[in-house]
Image (tube, helix red, strand yellow):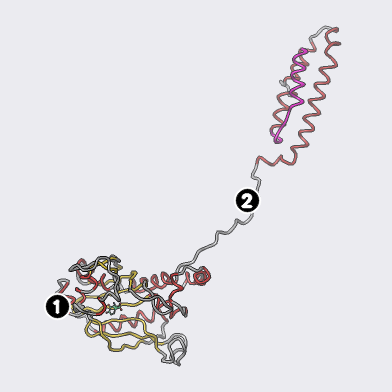
Amino acid sequence: MKEEIEKLMEQVRNLACANAKDVEEARVRLLGKKGEITKLFDEFRTFSPELKREFGKKINELKQAATAKIEALKEQTASTAVSDGPKEDLSMPGTPVPLGSRHPVSIVRQQIVDIFRKFGYDVAEGPEIEDDYHVFEALNFPPNHPARDMQDTFFVSAGHLNPLLLRTHTSSVQVRAMETMKLPIRVICPGRVFRNEAISARAHCIFHQVEGLYIDENVTFADLKQAILLFAREMFGPETAIRMRPSYFPFTEPSSEVDVSCNICHGKGCNICKGTGWLEIMGCGMVDPNVLEASGIDSKKYSGFAFGMGLERIAMLKWQVNDLRHYFENDLRFLSQFKTAIEV
Ligand code: DAH
């Protein structure tokens, strides 16, 4: 009995509880109906009067010590009584994760893709590292055309018959489309292009284009004009007018440059349109029969139109970006301005 009391006394002294639940468990273990101290008392009751005298004081001290300790621990852990549940207020609003924004060039690309998808065009992509054949030869570039020159083109392998190079325009994808797709073809080709230009506010060695191609029987210049007009109105607003100026590209005949009415000054003349009331947005034309034949399409039966536009230029006109370099520098002060433009 003596050792028993001492052992339990030691336990009571060292008792430590982290929370109210632990305190209650300790109380039941020591002082509960079947608790260890209660059991001692049961045994004590059977003792002879001499033994009772011997142990009475000690066993009572143990009980008091245990009761006091449990009371003290109860108080101590009262503040952590709720610690079984969540410690934080789960109804508080969370820390917001800052939302990124889309790059202006990809916003414009998506808009153009969406517009032409509505017109029934497919989307096609081609390789950025192309061969001379798809970038120039099949597009009717004469062998000594200046665009093939080292000054304009980044060559990956020079000197071969059909050197590899970084494509200088996405018109190369229209060749791949004509080679592989079934007629009639209605396709747009967004992508990155490369030119060996000194970097400045007005020129860059990397930029983006969207190429368009439509080939079927009896496609005329009137179809081209209507497609471009509908596109321009979707892109720049329903009041937009277009103007076509004669131009030259090796792969189209006739060729034309397209202007849209200035959506800043509405034709009155401002510094964006340099006082003309018009903004140049793309080149286009009727696909040259040589280009159709080079890809195995019968130019007597089929005709088509093509167009190509620069995405940085369109984004520049839409948001009055005054320096091409902004697009490639990843400066958040520039990029975060297009946050709201995601919903456009
Ligand atoms: N490839 C031309 C360029 O990079 C753009 C272009 C003009 C594409 C006229 C066309 C077109 O398809 O018909 O400047």
Instruction: For mark 2, give the secondary structure.
Output: loop
Which stretch did the figure color magenta?
1-21
Instruction: Measuring from the top left, give residue 80's x and y in whole percent.
Output: 71, 40
* Nearest to the observer: residue 244 or residue 273: 273
Mark 1 packing: few (<14 Cα in 10 Å), some, or many (20+)? few
The residue carrying mark 2 is 90
Residue at 77 percent of width and 37 percent of height: 76
- As displayed, is residue 155 above or below residue 256? above
Q: Amino acid at mark 2?
A: Leu
The residue carrying mark 1 is 301
Instruction: For mark 1, give the secondary structure.
Output: loop
* Nearest to the observer: residue 282 or residue 27: 282
Image quarter for ligand 1: bottom left
- As displayed, is residue 62 above or below residue 157? above
* Nearest to the observer: residue 292 or residue 25: 292
Q: Give the quadrant of the N terminus.
A: top right
